[in-house]
Amino acid sequence: MTSSSMATTMLWYARRRRRRQMTDHFRFVHITDTHIMAGGAWRMRGTDVDFDTDASLRRVVDTVRRLDPAPAFAVLGGDLTSPDLLHRDRVLEPAEYASSYMRLKEILAGLPCPAHYLMGNHDNLEAFNRALRPQAAKDAPAYYGFDHGGMHFVALDSHEPGHADGMLDAAQFAWLERDLAVHGGAPTIVFVHHHPWPLGHAWMDTMQLRNGADLMSLLGRHSEVRWLIGGHVHSEQVIQRGALTMLTTPSTCIQLAKVGGPVHFEPGPPGFRVVDVDDGRLSSYVVYVR
């Protein structure tokens, strides 16, 4: 075989492989705002009700295990642990998060699939890396990309220490631009904890992504980015902005009422999102565990 015909054959196989990957049918789950806090329960704002976030996450994991077909992977969308909610009077050290991350890992070991993790405003980077990314340096940025079934996925890190709202720094924007350019041929889903635009809830909209407009501008330059999936708002939302669809997923524990008035939390029901992908097309629904 000549070098020219060999190159042609290799290109044919590469195209065939890409087509086969694009016709893969698979699903994944988005699980977010688990708020695991070893040593206590979440006292709901304005009430004397304590909520067991461990128990609610276990119920979600048990429900995910019964999905048919099973998910290929899970994405954990941030606010994974929240021991800071038990000690609002001081800033916790990374070591004080360790037992909560260990509890999280123990519960998530019941998932029928591998998991990818995002940071939220209640998380701690050093403890997060030590527990969930032990191969990474303790201060390594928690943004990255991965591929599955002919699609590209991007996990952003909107956590900024000491802030309830979110921020993406210049280094992350530069990385994102490069990553999307490299994977420009693949339909892409981006995950971020904080919502990049107002959702109409006065309280939560004070804690959105501060430079969300910059993120939307960047994503708008990449037509392969079709979906943005977030957490943080403890409620289910579907928002269309131009060619981009944003989905938010309810928490596995406490939910925030979708009203524009005073803050009102509800004790569940726990929820998570199922996303089915077929030849680069996405369909999704939320499961509430009652």
Image (tube, grey):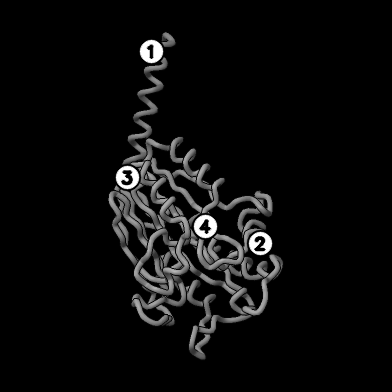
Q: Residue at x 41, y 76 (%)?
A: 256
Disc 1 versus disc 4: nearer the observer: 4
Please, is residue 227 above or below residue 98 in the view? Answer: above
Q: Secondary structure at mark 4?
A: loop
**Residue 224 falls in which quadrant of the image?**
top left
Give the residue at mark 1: 5
Q: Secondary structure at mark 2?
A: helix
The reply, left or right, for residue 256 in relation to residue 102 is left
Q: Residues within 10 Å of mark 4 (few under 14, many from 20)?
A: many
The reply, left or right, for residue 120 in relation to residue 28 is right
Residue 3 in sight in this render: yes
Q: Secondary structure at mark 3?
A: loop
Give me the C-alpha separation between circle 1 and circle 4: 51 Å
The reply, left or right, for residue 22 in relation to residue 91 is left
Image quadrant in which the C terminus is located: bottom left
Q: Are marks 3 and 1 in contact (CB under 8 Å)?
A: no
* N-terminal label among 2 and 3: 2
Q: Secondary structure at mark 1?
A: helix
Give me the C-alpha separation between circle 4 and circle 2: 20 Å
Disc 2 versus disc 1: nearer the observer: 2
Q: Which mark is residue 280?
A: 3
Q: Residue at x 49, y 84 (%)?
A: 45
